[in-house]
Image (cartoon, rainbow, N blue to C red):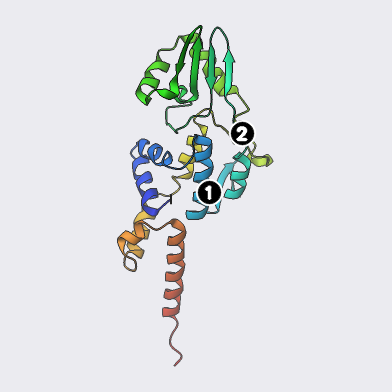
Amino acid sequence: MRITFQNLKDISDTLSKDDEQFLVDYLNRFDGKNIHEKFLNILKTWEEDVSHTISFSNDEKNMKVNISYVIESFKDVEREDIVLEKDFQITLGIPDKFTNKGVFDLSKTIKNIKYGSSQIKLNDMNDEDRDHFVENLPANVFNTIAKEVLSNQKYTAGFDNDNLKHLKINFLNNSAYMFLKGLFNPYKKDYFLDIIYYLSRKIDGNILLNSTITDIEYYIDKMNIENSENEIPSLA
């Protein structure tokens, strides 16, 4: 799967209208059995198709970091599920899909619940039934799970660089989605309009829209070289 100019334009357009569902659906199209694997594959594709670096702000300073360093920093997290033993037994694990439901989406984090002889496998439910089930959990059960999801460090990864230690991702909650949301929306409307305006005179519209940002930067470099050469008077 590639990240194209059209993809980024559509994401930017929808986010500007406070519609995040397009981005959620797009991110979930990437390979990976859970959001951690999808996250790493998205970053690898971003490195190839968009940019080798990403910018972070810290204390009003901007830092450019290689995507390869980001991937290395976030690749190792706990892979085994958590089992909470209270008056009930609850199995938690990394969600299989991204969502944009606030800080966390317990319907994707809870895998299994056992109470006495009863067992409920949320993975076997459709999304609507999972949401309904979690919304109707007793308050004490919901709060116990939420506390674990927010505080557990085994599924959390971050940077070893002192200037970036405040940036952590807990793959049990929605912080990975929030990270990617910021990554996928660096370009404003004028950027896309300028690219279309200047390059569509040289490149077919469909080819342009299905190009990657890496391709487009190549087109721009070639066009700048061509324009520069045309400004030099012939010496013949």
Q: Amino acid at mark 2?
A: Val
Please indicate, yes or no, whether residue 189 appears anywhere in the rendered image.
no
Q: In the rendering, at what x and y percent does residue 115 appear? A: 50, 9
In the image, 142 versus 88, the foreground residue is: 88
Marks 2 and 1 in Cβ contact (< 8 Å): no
Please tell me whether residue 71 is drawn above or below residue 48 in the rendered image.
above
Q: In the rendering, at what x and y percent does residue 203 appear? A: 34, 66
128 horizontally vs 92: left or right = left
User: Residue 61's image quarter?
Assistant: top right
User: Residue 18's image quarter?
Assistant: top left
Task: Please give the residue where the numbered disc 1 appears in the rendered image.
Answer: 44
Count of labels in the image: 2
Q: Secondary structure at mark 1?
A: helix
Q: Secondary structure at mark 2?
A: loop
Please tell me whether residue 121 is drawn above or below residue 73 in the rendered image.
above
Mark 1 burial class by Cα count in 10 Å: few <14, some 14-19, many 20+: some
- Residue 77's disc number: 2
Q: Amino acid at mark 1?
A: Lys
Q: Which quarter shows the C terminus?
A: bottom left
In the image, 216 versus 210, the foreground residue is: 210
Q: Residue at x 56, y 23 (%)?
A: 150
Q: In the rendering, at what x and y percent does residue 223 appear? A: 42, 70
Q: Residue at x 41, y 41 (%)?
A: 29
211 horizontally vs 116: left or right = left
Please tell me whether residue 159 is drawn above or below residue 205 in the rendered image.
above
The disc, 2 or 1, on the residue closer to the chain's N-terminal end is 1
Q: In the rendering, at what x and y percent does residue 162 appear? A: 68, 40
User: Residue 72's image quarter?
Assistant: top right
Q: Residue at x 34, y 45 (%)?
A: 13
Please indicate, yes or no, whether residue 132 appears anywhere in the rendered image.
yes
CA gap between label 2 and label 1 equals 17 Å
